[in-house]
Each structure stands twice: as structure tokens, then as C-alpha cells.
Image (cartoon, rainbow, N blue to C red):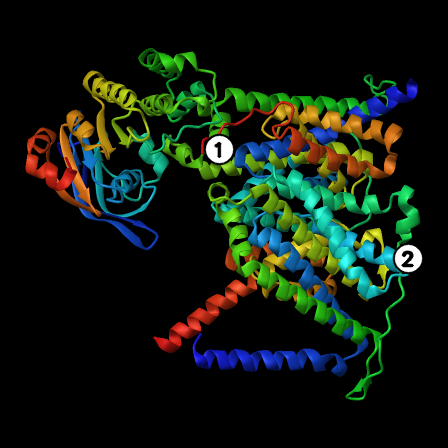
Amino acid sequence: MEALLYQVSSGLANGIIYGSVALALVMIYQATHHINFAQGEMATFSTFIAWALIQAGWSYWAAFFFTVAVSFAGGLLVQRIVLRPIEKAPVLTNVIVFIGLLLIFNALSGMLFDHTIKAFDSPFAKDAWFDTKYFSSHQVGSAGVLLVVLFALFAFFKYTSVGLAMRAAAQNPDSAMLVGIRVSWMLGLGWGLAAAIGAVAGMMVAPIVFLDPNMMAGILLYGFAGALLGGIDNPLGAVFGGLVVGVLENLLGAYVIGTELKLTVALVLIVGTLTLRPDGLFGKKVVTRV
Amino acid sequence: MANLFEAKKLSAFYGATQVLFDIDFDIEAGKITTILGANGAGKTTTLRALCQIVRTTGSMTLNAGAGEVQLVGMSTDAIVRMGVAHVPDGRGTFTALSVEDNLKLGAYVRTDKAEVARDIDKAYARFPQLAERRNQQAGTLSGGEQQMLAISRALMLRPKLLLLDEPSFGLAPMIVAEIFRIMRSINAEDGVSMLLVEQNASLALNLAHHAYLLETGTVALSGPAEQIKNDESVRRAYLGY
Amino acid sequence: MKPLDRKWVWIGSLLLLAVLLVLPFLVKNYRVFQFNLVLVYAVAILGLNILTGFNGQFSLGHGAFYAFGAYTAAILMSKYGVPYWATLPAAFVVCFVFGFLVGFPALRLAGHFLALATFALALAVPQLLKYKKIEGFTGGVQGLVLDKPQPPFEFRFLDQPLSSDRWLYFFTLMVAALMFLLAWNLLRGRVGRALVAIRDHPIAATAMGINLPMFKSLTFGTSAGFTGLAGALGAIAVAFVSPDSFTVQLSIFLLVGLVVGGLASIPGAIFGGIFIQYVPNIADELSKSAPAAIYGVLLIAMMYLMPSGVMGGLHRLWARLRANSTG
């Protein structure tokens, strides 16, 4: 029983990370109707920036917020400069450019920060008051950070007019223009937000898996699975999906197929969701007329 | 300039293809002007040119209370802010968003929140079917209901000029009649100027005050709607009935 | 085509054939091995092109089919003593079936989501290949070492022997030529038009009576078969398979090759093969991370400048030259 609880709690803790990556993916999807394959690499790059700042003597939270701000700006710039020219191009073109960005960011991380694994300290001290038996202080702290981000996003999309405008611009750019929305800027905003969330996810992951250019590859896949499971247009669902993936990964790994096939679990989840419930558990079914 | 809007030597292009050839037309404030013509005559392009969604040359001046403003070269969102609302062909509703969200988006550029809320209530009063479905996904509405929603969304701007692209398209005659009735009342009560593009000439001529006929990108005929409606030879030659 | 043009096409083709046949004897074995891999990748890219270029179904996971073809060949050769040339049809069939099965869930996916699902497949394959329970077959993490096939007869030309590498090159050349011919034949007729119709207007295609699900799944299968066969050829040439030879990077490189060569262009696959074989070597000399960065920049640049690949660029150049000469 202990072991089971441990698997579940550890799964939930991992799930929080997957959930935040899923959140970033959903962000971009909500804003642009594209899936950003480069999300993991961008997050890793952001984490490296934070690491460099901390090495240079900055306090953790100063580095944290600065990195988030810089990542936001970076994401916005990437959209404005790299993606804007192909906004109207076919989907395959966009997918290929995302892959190009994936390769570039990965290479940048390697070139600027080299490939040795680095330690990244958690801001949540090991003996803090919220350190518990099943969840370490870092895991609790990460969950708290994630919840804050999540609620902020939720409120943004549901209650602000900019959030509504972003969703409208993604779904129907032509009509969005006709009500006075600057569609191009909405896309840039979406990318900026996603980059910022990715940076947060990266900084929460790094203390656990250590920092190197390939940190996020596997996690990205779990993030995808979580985002799809929860419904690709639903931020709350994304986080829930991430948690489910985390727990399933651990339970299946410990009791069913062994730990070696964890990525296969993600694969099956992704394909299964896309085939059986393409809108995910919480996504809305969108009706289109022919 | 007495008119609300004047276009002079307006040409429009899709890429290298020219679709409108130096056309002139005016829109009188408070009146309904209609542009008629067959498929491919350039009617939809005219509306798109007005909103600067296609490349244009020539001049388009809008006199909506802030002096005379040249629209050619303006960004679409700036034109919207000047009070031009466009109901595109095919309705253009945000199908994945709720009816209420669609209405809110119509008022995106406005800052007076209280008035916006009032206008939403007014839209529901005018179209009870929308009120019933306020939280439903817009894509689940019937064609007629979507047209009502599209018009309501455009009215949320409190526009000075309302552009309508083939509102009768694909709708059953009874519903079309109701929509045209409502368009007349909107014009009569709120004094909203309208530019109506229609293939259904008889409907449009019954509603409008002034009419233009486009033939392959040029103005073949223009005059008071009443006159054109009653001129049998014109009708037979140009409008087919 | 004007008679003058036809004459040039014939002359060009004969020259090309001569070069292809004589070149292996002019260079060292290692270079011949590289030419061999160019052909292998070209066939793999051709397979991907059938699915993504002509039929519009994304695959970021074709490395998986390549891997399965390679392992099929390797297992048949090392565990069952099957001669190398016989493994090719087996690899094709195995991968065809596998691709056909993958095609079914793919029916419900499009665009990003299909890219995503196939991406997941590519990521999962190395792990699957390392799975301890099937180590008996796959050789686990260490993989399988194969015997390099020997040429079936003695031959000397230009004072160079027909070595193993040279023989395999000719073997691959013949198979590749056959596969390209097959693809060309398949794609230029009704089948090809149906594929493109499905890509561009799926609803209209269905309305015209094309059985969409069957067609799309068969396309997936055929595409997988081609790439799987290429994998088998690759395994024979390299004489070694291991899980880490088939990471997601392979899938990405195949896509890169497809884009560089030109979507929906059969000859473009050859340019793609040349690109992914040689550019990493050149880029590697710059820095450890450079190949990835160069690929990334190139991908993006191609999408801006030459979205229809090298073949598209060549077509435009050719059109411009002819316009100038007749104008």
C-alpha cells in the first residue's frame, strides 16, 4: 500500500511538470491553432538563461521573474520575425518551421552553455514547513507555482477581452479582423505567453532532472499526451491531463509493463486519445458545417 | 462633403488580377445603398476594398463625424474603429465560441462597458432566438440564426456604416423576409447607414434607397432604387426579371 | 517536349548512367559506401513523399518504419540465415502491413495531430527496440551485427576489384531504380490523381466515389513499405543495427530530406538523400551542435525561399531559361 501511494504521489509530482508543459502547448494552440514542437527546447533555453543569471550572482526569484519576462519577449519576437511571413502558409510549412526552431534552440543551448550536466537548485528549501512525507518541498512548491499560473491564465482567457480576442483570432482570423482585432499581434501574444509558461516549467523541472540541452525531450512528449488528454483547447484540462499521464506512467511502469517502455505509454495515450476521444476529456466538440 | 462615404476611381486587385476598374459610388448618410450584380461582378470585392482587406488604388473618403478621412491605406482595425462594421458573406461567425461571446467581440473596440451590456440586451430583445441560445456554440445555430447573430455582432459596434454581404444567401424565403424587415427597422429607428450587396435584386430594390449595378468590375447603372425597380426595360436588360 | 529537348534528355540520361556505373571504380570503398547510403535515403524519402508530399498525410515518424525494415532484414539474416536479397520483399511486406495498421488511427487525425502522433511513434521506437523481453530477437541495446554480403562474381574494372561495397552499391542502385520506377508508375495514373485529390479536397474526393479510408490506409502502407525496404537496404550496407541508430533524429532528417528535395517530386528524393548524407559531415566539422542548428536554419530558409524544394527551384529556373530563349 505504501508503495502504491508512493507511486501515485510521485506520479502526481511528475504530472505537475507535464501539466505545465501541457499548459504552454495549449496556450499556443488556443492562440494560433498550431502545436509548437519547439516548446521543450525553448523552455530548456530559458532555463539555461536563469541558470546563467544565478551563476552570475542574482537571487533565485529575481532570476526567475527576469527569465519569465525575457522568455515572453523572446516568444513574441520569434512569432513576429520567424512565423509571421508564413502565417497563411499550409500547415506542413508551419510544422517544418517549428521543427527548424526545435533544432536551432537545441543547438543554441548546446553551443552557448555546453553539454555538461548542470545542477539547478530549487528555491524551496528541503526543510521548509510544507515538506511532507509523500511530497518534497520542491514538489509542493512547484505545484503552488503552477496553480498560480493556471488560475491567472484561466482568468485571462475567460474574463478579459484580450483573452477572448486571442481565441477569436486563432479560430477565425478573417472575422477577427472585421471586429477590429489586430490578429498578428494576438498570435505574437500567444507565443509570448507560451514561452513564459515554458520557462516556468523548465525552471521547475531542472532541479529534478538536472540541466542539459536534452532535458525536455521526453517531457515534451508527456506534455503532449497530457494536453491531448485534457482537450487541446482547455488549460485546466491540460493540467489535469498532465497529472493523469504522470500517475499512469508510474503505475503502468511499476505494475504492468516495466519501466523501460514509459515512452510507449505516452505514445499509446496520445494515439488512443486522438483516435477515441479527439476532443480529450474536457475539450469542447467544435461543430463545423461543410 | 455631404455624403457619408465617397469612392472615386476605386480599383481593387487580387494579387496581379484587377477586379474593380475605377468605380465611383456614394453612400448617403442615414440611407440604404445597394450594389447589385451577377456572380463575379465584384460586389464582395467592393466591400472588402472598403475594409482594406484587398489591395486598392484610388480614393475612399469617410465622413463619419471626425472630418473627412481617407480609407485607402488604413489598417482594417483602424477602419473598424472609425465605425465601419462588416457582415461578411457566409456570416463569419466564430463557430466555436458562444453566442454571447460573439456579441462581445462585436464590441471589441469599444470601451464603454455599461453601454455594451445594454446593447447586448437590445440584441436579445430584437432576436429572442439568440437569447435562448446565448451560451450555445454559434456553430450549432441554423443559417438564419447565424445571420441574425452576424448582424447583431456588427451592430454591437454602434456603427456609422453597416456593410452587408449577401445576407439572403442560402436562407429560406421566410427567414430572409424577416431579416430584411429587421434591416429596414434598424435603418429607420437607429438611422444606421447601410451598404447592402445582394444578388437578389428584387429584395434589395424593395429595401434600398439608392442602387448601383456592377458588371465585371464597372458601374453599369446607378440611380434611385424606386426608379430602377419600376423601369421594366432596365430590369429586363440588367436584372433578368 | 520539343525534339531538341528530347535529344538533350537522352544524352543527359546516358551520361548520368555512365557516371553512375563507372564512378564506384574511380573512388575508394568508403566513398562508394556513402553513395550507397545516398540511394538508401533517397528510397526512404521517396516513401515518405508518397504519404506526405502526394497524399498530404504528415509523418514525423518514418524513422520507425525504416527501423522496422532494418530490423526485419537483420533478424532474418542473423537468426534465420536468410540471404540478404530475400530480406527485401520481407521488409517491404512487414512494413506495409504495419503502415497499413498505423493508417487506421491516422484516418481520424490531420495536420498537427497526425504530426504529433507520428512524432510520438518516432520517440518511442528506440525504447521499444531495447525492450528486454524481446532481446532474444533484437539483440537489445547492443543490437545485431550482420555479415557483409560478398559479391557473387569476380570482376575488375579500371584496375579496381568489385569489392563488397561496390557490389552492394550496384545492388542498391538496381533496387532503387526499380522502386523509383514503381513509384512513378503508381503516381502518374489514376492512383496518383486520387492521392492528390485526397490531399487537396478530401470532401470532394469522397463525393466523387474515392474510398477515402481504404485509400489513405493503403497509402500509409505503401509509404511504410518503401521506407522499410530502404531500411533493409541500409542495414545490409551498414551490416549493423542497434536501437540508437533509429532515434527521432532519423525521422526529422527524412523530413528535412523531403523538404529539401521537394514535396511531391519523385526525383527530388535523390537530392534529399544527398543532402542528409553529406551535410552532417560538413557541418560536424564546425562544432558538436552545429548540424542541428544548420538543419534548423536551412529548414526555415527553405520554407521561405524555396517552399517546393530543390526540384521546385530547378523547375522555376528551367522555366525562366526557356522563357528567355523564346522571348
User: What residue lies at 55% left-to-right and 58% top-to-bottom?
Assistant: C264
Q: Quadrant of the N terminus of chain A?
A: top right
Q: Is residue A40 visible?
A: yes
Task: Return the mark for residue C80.
Answer: 2
In three-dimensional space, the C-alpha distance between marks 2 and 1, rounded to whole angstroms, equals 55 Å
Q: Nearer the viewer, residue C301 or C157?
A: C157
Dot 2 alpha-carbon crowd within 10 angstroms: few under 14, some 14 to 19, many 20 or more: few
Dots 2, 1 in contact, CB < 8 A: no
Q: Which numbered marker is on residue A171?
A: 1
> What's the mark number on residue C98?
none
Residue B77, compared with residue C261, is above or below; it is: above
Three-letter code, disc 1: Gln
**Residue A139: where, in percent of width, then height?**
79, 25
Q: Residues within 10 Å of mark 1 (few under 14, many from 20)?
A: many
Callout 1: chain: A
Q: Which mark is in front, 2 or 1? A: 2
As drawn, the residue found furthest toward the bottom would be C159
x then y, percent, for residue C202: 51, 43
Place of residue C157 in the rendered image (x, y in percent of width and height, measured from the top left): 78, 86
Residue A29: x, y in percent? 57, 34
Q: Is residue C193 above or below residue B210?
A: below
Q: Amino acid at mark 2?
A: Tyr
